[in-house]
Image (tube, grey):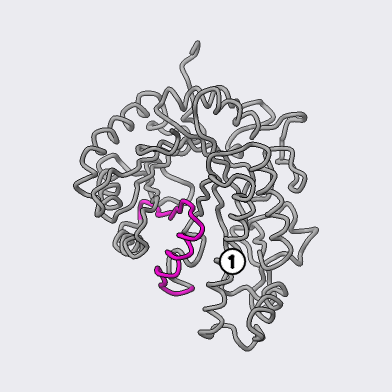
């Protein structure tokens, strides 16, 4: 099964491929993923910029999208042929595609200036943007029948002062945002509201497919880290029990000092999390991670009671055939030690997340 212990996710971001040159070949990528030990494809279906890689009724098509193609549909079929699970990933808050036409959906600061991430506008789910995203969630689940749905960047910033937040706070509590912002009652409301928004999206998906696993990117879902909205694992645990989903915390490899924080949170939740440990450098990484350091980081994650996930990105040495085999061998050996390291005494779930460059195959394969 795609979700059994030892999970290997082969992460594919179509934005890393030149669509105009036909580089995004689902059959080729799935064949390579299967031969490389993968049992699931995590495919970006809706990008952080708000573009779709399938013919959506809501979101505009990605730049370079080839007319008549359905990239998500092609991966769904290829996954079935090769016995792989399909886990579409939808980026929720970032959206440059609709920002110009719907400025009322944007998150804004106390000074009225709109928020963005490195130039990408950030939308607020306390506006009717929630209906827009819900429509995308429903069409992906209904059309492709995925095994898992990844909802990433589900962010409602504590500092958002948009009209949607004003109305939501007033309707829920009777408080006025200008007066309540920053207070304890406001923080309680923001926490509960974020849970409700996440619940709405997950339930929209599970209403179509009840056994669907829903995985949230925890580092962008503020209650998960217990920072902006307070340390409340007991409330998050109850929410997760009711929702019955998977749950992901994104932990970047250079942040070893956070192992204890993440481990304590997950022990309080009584659930395992997925923590990402970098191998090759990401665009925002401080440096590459040699295998010796990867072992230390993965060991720290397992000791914290979480599942280590490794993401290689770009045409780096670990992404070629020999490097991939060595990486799989490393985790096969390391998996035998995980029972002794895990706080729950169970084998860790290891994930190797691979993007462009990792699907390079020998000519004639």
* Range shown magenta: 229-254
| Side of 122 where 296 appears, left or right | left
* Residue under the image location 53 percent in, 50 percent down: 214
Q: In the displayed image of the protein, which residue is found farthest to the bottom?
A: 179
Q: Quadrant of residue 46?
A: top right
Q: Position of residue 11 (x, y in %)?
A: 50, 38
Figure quadrant of residue 209 = top right
Mark 1 Cα within 10 Å, few/some/many (few <14, many 20+)? few
Q: Residue furthest top?
A: 364
Q: How many discs appear?
A: 1
For residue 232, above or below residue 291: below
Q: Is residue 127 above or below residue 72?
A: below
Residue 80 image offset from top left, x and y in percent = 55, 27
Quadrant location, the N terminus:
top left
Disc 1 element: helix
Residue at 46%, 30% in the rendered image: 358
Magenta highlight on residue 89: no
Residue drawn where x is 27% and y is 46% of the image: 346
Residue 141, how many percent across, how many down? 64, 43
Q: Is residue 249 magenta?
A: yes
Q: Residue furthest right?
A: 101
Q: Nearer the viewer, residue 84 or 209?
A: 209
Q: Please state which of residues 242 and 309 is positioned toward the viewer in this rendering.
A: 242
Location of mark 1 (residue) = 196
Q: Is residue 131 above or below residue 39?
A: below
> Percent from the top left, x then y, of residue 318?
38, 32
Residue 285 is left or right of residue 48, and the answer is: left
């Amino acid at each position: 099964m795609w979700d059994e212990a030892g999970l290997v996710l082969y992460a594919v971001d179509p934005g890393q491929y030149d669509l105009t040159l036909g580089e995004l070949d689902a059959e080729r990528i799935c064949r390579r993923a299967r031969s490389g030990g993968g049992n699931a494809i995590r495919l970006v279906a809706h990008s952080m910029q708000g573009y779709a890689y399938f013919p959506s009724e809501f979101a505009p098509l990605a730049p370079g999208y080839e007319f008549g193609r359905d990239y998500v549909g092609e991966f769904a079929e290829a996954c079935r042929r090769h016995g792989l699970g399909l886990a579409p990933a939808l980026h929720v808050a970032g959206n440059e595609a609709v920002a110009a036409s719907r400025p009322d959906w944007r998150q804004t600061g106390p000074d009225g200036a709109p928020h963005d991430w490195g130039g990408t506008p950030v939308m607020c789910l306390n506006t009717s943007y929630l209906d827009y995203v819900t429509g995308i969630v429903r069409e992906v689940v209904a059309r492709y029948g995925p095994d898992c749905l990844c909802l990433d960047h589900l962010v409602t910033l504590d500092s958002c002062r948009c009209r949607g937040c004003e109305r939501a706070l007033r309707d829920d509590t009777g408080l006025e945002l200008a007066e309540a912002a920053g207070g304890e009652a406001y923080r309680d409301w923001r926490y509960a509201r974020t849970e409700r928004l996440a619940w709405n999206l997950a339930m929209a998906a599970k209403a179509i497919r009840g056994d669907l696993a829903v995985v949230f990117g925890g580092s962008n879902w503020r209650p998960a880290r217990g920072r902006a909205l307070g340390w409340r694992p007991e409330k998050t645990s109850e929410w997760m029990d009711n929702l019955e989903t998977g749950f992901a915390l994104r932990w970047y490899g250079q942040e070893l000092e956070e192992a204890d924080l993440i481990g304590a949170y997950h022990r309080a939740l009584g659930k395992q999390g997925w923590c990402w440990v970098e191998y090759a450098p990401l665009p925002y990484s401080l440096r590459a991670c040699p295998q010796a350091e990867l072992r230390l980081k993965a060991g720290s994650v397992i000791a914290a009671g979480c599942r280590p996930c490794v993401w290689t990105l770009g045409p780096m040495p670990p992404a070629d055939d020999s490097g991939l085999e060595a990486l799989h061998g490393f985790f096969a050996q390391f998996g035998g030690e995980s029972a002794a390291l895990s706080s729950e005494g169970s084998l860790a779930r290891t994930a190797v997340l691979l993007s462009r460059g990792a699907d390079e195959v020998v000519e004639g394969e």
